Image: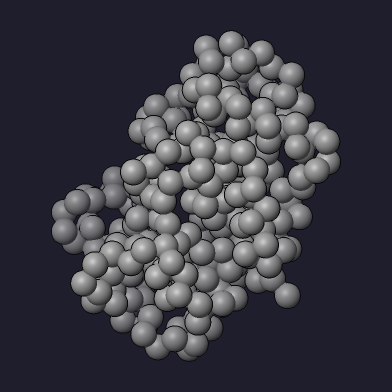
Amino acid sequence: MTLHLNSQTDLEEAMHALLQLDPRLQPVFAVAGMPALRRREPGFVGLAHIVCGQQLSTASASAIWARLTAAFDPFHHDGFRRARADRLGRLGLSAAKIKTLKNLAREIAAERLNLDMLANEEADAAHHTLVSLHGIGPWTADVYLLFCLGHGDAWPAGDLAVQEAVKIGFGLKKRPTPKEMADIAEPWRPMRGAAAHLWWSYYRTIKRREGVIGGAAGAKVDSTKAASKKAVSDKSPVAKRS
């Protein structure tokens, strides 16, 4: 049965079970404390929001998203599917993102894709379904599964913030590769999503101590957004990362 992180209570219960499962995480938890659950809107809206923000600053992404949601109210895949590409471009979307989102809207309209059903699939199968779509790469897939669907076992192996946190927390000589990250997280199934929340919280705590993230502003930093610019490359130009 798939674990779901739909509430803070769900996350806390999963975290306590995770700490019992792997005592190596207890010093990490002592630094990070209990993470706060992070959720976004599911469905086409949630995935489109993630795609829209890739490779952009928070301010730029927010401005484009505000224009899109104002132009399409409600923000529905049918309306987006019928929209002219030149209109979408004037709202701030790149040609690659337009292609990705239009393809996504067509797949949903044709009932070949049900994003909500992915919440109940095994994490690796759900991940595979998403990355098989044009323009949706590993990082985008995992962030959608974690934050939009609350999938308790999604694991963002290519996220730089999580990689760096694991390197520091486990005293590794170098940042682990996505393959190494997958191996490291294997013992945490089916709670790898809870582990991801822990490592992101640990990353923010460490960076605040280093002065990289400061004060109240630091508490609002979306480390996954920052890391997305350098995470493992998605397979299309939509989110090409170094």
Which residue lies at the image location 83% right of the left edge and 41% below the top edge?
111
- In the picture provided, is 26 more to the left or to the right than 211? right
Q: Nearer the viewer, residue 178 or 203?
A: 178
Q: Is residue 91 above or below residue 24?
A: above
Residue 205 location (% of width, % of height): 28, 62
Specify the quadrant of the image occupied by residue 211. bottom left
Residue 70 location (% of width, % of height): 60, 20
Specify the quadrant of the image occupied by residue 63. top left
Which residue lies at the image location 75% right of the left edge and 37% below the top edge?
107
Residue 104 visible within the image: yes
Q: Is residue 228 above or below residue 163?
A: above
Question: Which image quadrant: the C terminus?
Answer: top left
Which residue lies at the image location 50% right of the left edge and 77% below the top edge?
186
- In the picture provided, is 19 more to the left or to the right than 201? right
Which residue lies at the image location 59% right of the left edge and 67% below the top edge?
152
Residue lying at the far left in this picture: please name it.
210
Residue 215 location (% of width, % of height): 23, 50
Q: Is residue 56 above or below residue 233?
A: above
- In the picture provided, is 178 more to the left or to the right than 236? left
Specify the quadrant of the image occupied by residue 135. top right
Question: Which image quadrant: the N terminus?
Answer: bottom right
Q: Is residue 37 above or below residue 41?
A: below
Residue lying at the far right in this picture: please name it.
111
